[in-house]
Image (spheres, rainbow, N blue to C red):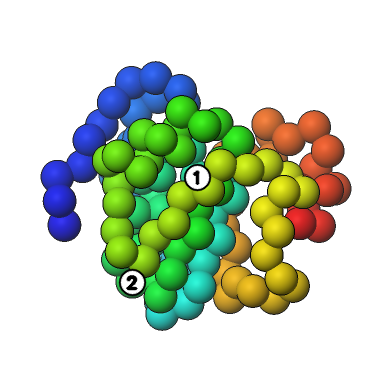
Amino acid sequence: MKALALTKGGSGPPDPIFHAEMANWLEPLTEGRKILEFGCGKGYLSYLLSAHAREVFAVDTDEDAIKFARAHYSSPNLVYLHCGVGQIGFAENFFDTVVSFEVIEHISDYQEYLSE
């Protein structure tokens, strides 16, 4: 695993201990599976999940955060996408697991967010 960049800006620097614990907690739900992380921010958790997932698709509405994630947290099985609620565009049941942390409080139409 490459050295991880911890930077300020956007939502602030990732908390490496929290994200590592979250990735470990999620491992039984993500191991060998196709994952969507909605609201990936700067991509730190997505990067950690990619270590044991088959594929990770990480999306966020913040274009700068996606650019940062692509530059600092890349992996062959990890794709970052800049899009929002209702714009994801994948087929029904495309993903095995969907994760989204610290996002719902930022969504004005939470019903659309949950149905997506």
Residue in the foreground of this view, choosing between 83 and 6: 83
Q: Secondary structure at mark 1?
A: loop
Which residue lies at the image location 85% right of the left edge and 48% below the top edge?
111
Answer few, some or many: residues within 10 Å of disc 2's Cα (few below 14, many 20 plus, some between 14 and 19). some
Residue 52 tag number = 2
Residue 80 location, x and y as percent?
46, 50
Which residue lies at the image location 60% right of the left edge and 36% below the top edge?
61
Residue 115 location, x and y as percent?
81, 57
Name of the residue lying farthest toward the top: 9
Residue in the foreground of this view, choosing between 18 and 115: 115
Quarter of the view holding residue 66: top left
**Residue kind at label 2, given as amino acid type:** His
Taking the image as drawn, is residue 60 in sight?
Answer: yes
91 versus 45 height, above or below = below
76 versus 40 height, above or below = below
Taking the image as drawn, is residue 21 in sight?
Answer: no
12 versus 93 height, above or below = above
Q: Identify residue for label 1.
A: 40
Q: Earlier in the sequence, mark 1 or mark 2?
A: 1
Which residue lies at the image location 30% right of the left edge and 47% below the top edge?
73
Residue 73 tag number = none
Horizontal side of residue 60 vs 53, given as left or right: right
Quadrant of the image containing the N terminus: bottom left
Quadrant of the image containing the C terminus: bottom right
Which residue lies at the image location 33% right of the left edge and 71% below the top edge?
52
Horizontal side of residue 37 vs 20, given as left or right: right
